[in-house]
């Protein structure tokens, strides 16, 4: 992947801002989603930002003046189709874990809610969908987690967006509020070895968010409707 230099990125951002596009974010209350929201607002990339989620977030102050919130019931998403209408770009940072939601609940959120949201987004006019998936996602994987994530990718690709960017980060580094002991231990370990091999096992959520924001301002590749960004690509693109 060719990463634009900082001065090129600046120009790309300026011409993107001039288009005055609208975006929505799914999962803005999550660790990556909240960094993404902060990044797109800081860069003033969109004229309107809609957060689509199951609960209203407490966002006060002028920094959030262009933000609209749509509270939806993901089990009855067709009834909330209007929430998805009129957005050029859609970011999806939605997800749960088997530990939190059970196996069926995990499939429901990480595959079915995402597929349904993508379909409503396309019907509502979205032309660029950015999906946060995971390193190793593969519908034929023998690991349940990677298989479900791979199925979600396949189903989003099948929706047929003009442009679809799939992000496959490794373990996310952040100060997670919620207690996930196994992930905490992994994160501490990976945080230490990140000094040795910074781009292989992990990636900070701020880097993922910046890479997503940078991806959106970069021109589409006409020969490639679907682009997959692996962990090293995310590190490279999210540097500046
Ligand atoms: N953890 C990792 O190391 C890792 C590594 C690679 C990829 N990923 C993937 O990256 C994505 C984002 O991860 P993250 O850790 O940034 O997310 P996160 O902090 O767990 O946040 C998840 C988001 O999904 C929403 N959500 C969860 N269950 C829901 C439900 N039943 N109905 C509606 N919304 C629901 C949450 O909303 P509420 O705030 O309302 O709960 C939140 O906005 C996920 O798909 C994850 O699988 C994670």
Image: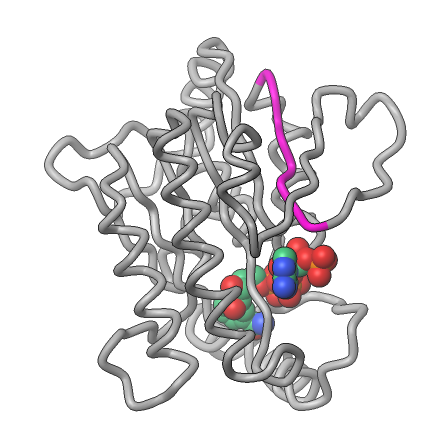
The front one of 116 and 51 is 116
Is residue 46 shown left or right of residue 13? right
Look at the picture and state if 106 lies above or below 88: below
Image quarter for ligand 1: bottom right
* Farthest left residue in view: 223
Main secondary structure along the magenta-highlighted residues: strand
Is residue 177 shown left or right of residue 132? right
> Residue 11 location in percent, x, y?
43, 18
Res 58 visible:
yes
In reply to whether residue 51 is colored magenta, the answer given is: yes
Picture quarter containing residue 2? top left
The front one of 140 and 120 is 120
Q: Residue at x 41, y 27 (%)?
A: 124
> Residue 112 location in percent, x, y?
43, 61
Q: Residue at x 65, y 37 (%)?
A: 51
Is residue 27 shown left or right of residue 65? left
Q: Which residues are magenta?
A: 47-54
Look at the picture and state if 189 lies above or below 135: below
The front one of 171 and 91 is 91
> Residue 23 location in percent, x, y?
52, 29
In reply to whether residue 215 is colored magenta, the answer given is: no
Res 31 visible:
no
Picture quarter containing residue 38? top right
Q: Residue at x 48, y 9 (%)?
A: 18
> Residue 143 location in percent, x, y?
36, 88
Look at the picture and state if 54 lies above or below 111: above
Q: Residue at x 78, y 72 (%)?
A: 178
């Amino acid at each position: 992947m060719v990463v634009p230099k900082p001065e090129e990125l600046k120009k790309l951002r300026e011409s993107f801002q001039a288009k005055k596009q609208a975006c929505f974010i799914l999962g803005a209350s999550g660790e990556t989603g909240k960094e993404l929201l902060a990044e797109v607002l800081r860069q003033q990339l969109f004229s309107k930002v809609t957060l689509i989620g199951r609960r209203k977030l407490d966002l006060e102050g002028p920094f959030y003046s262009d933000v609209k919130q749509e509270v939806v019931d993901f089990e009855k998403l067709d009834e909330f189709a209007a929430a998805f209408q009129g957005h050029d770009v859609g970011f999806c940072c939605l997800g749960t874990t088997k530990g939190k939601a059970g196996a069926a609940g995990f499939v429901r959120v990480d595959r079915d809610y995402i597929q349904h949201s993508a379909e409503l987004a396309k019907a509502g006019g979205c032309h660029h969908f950015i999906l946060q998936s995971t390193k190793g996602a593969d519908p034929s994987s023998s690991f349940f987690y990677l298989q479900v994530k791979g199925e979600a990718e396949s189903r989003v690709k099948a929706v047929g967006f003009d442009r679809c960017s799939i992000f496959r980060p490794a373990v996310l580094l952040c100060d997670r509020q919620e207690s996930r002991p196994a992930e905490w231990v992994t994160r501490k370990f990976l945080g230490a070895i990140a000094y040795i091999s910074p781009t292989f096992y992990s990636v900070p959520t701020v880097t993922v968010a910046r890479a997503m924001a940078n991806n959106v301002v970069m021109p589409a590749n006409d020969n490639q409707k679907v682009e997959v960004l692996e962990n090293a690509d995310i590190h490279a693109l999210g540097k500046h």
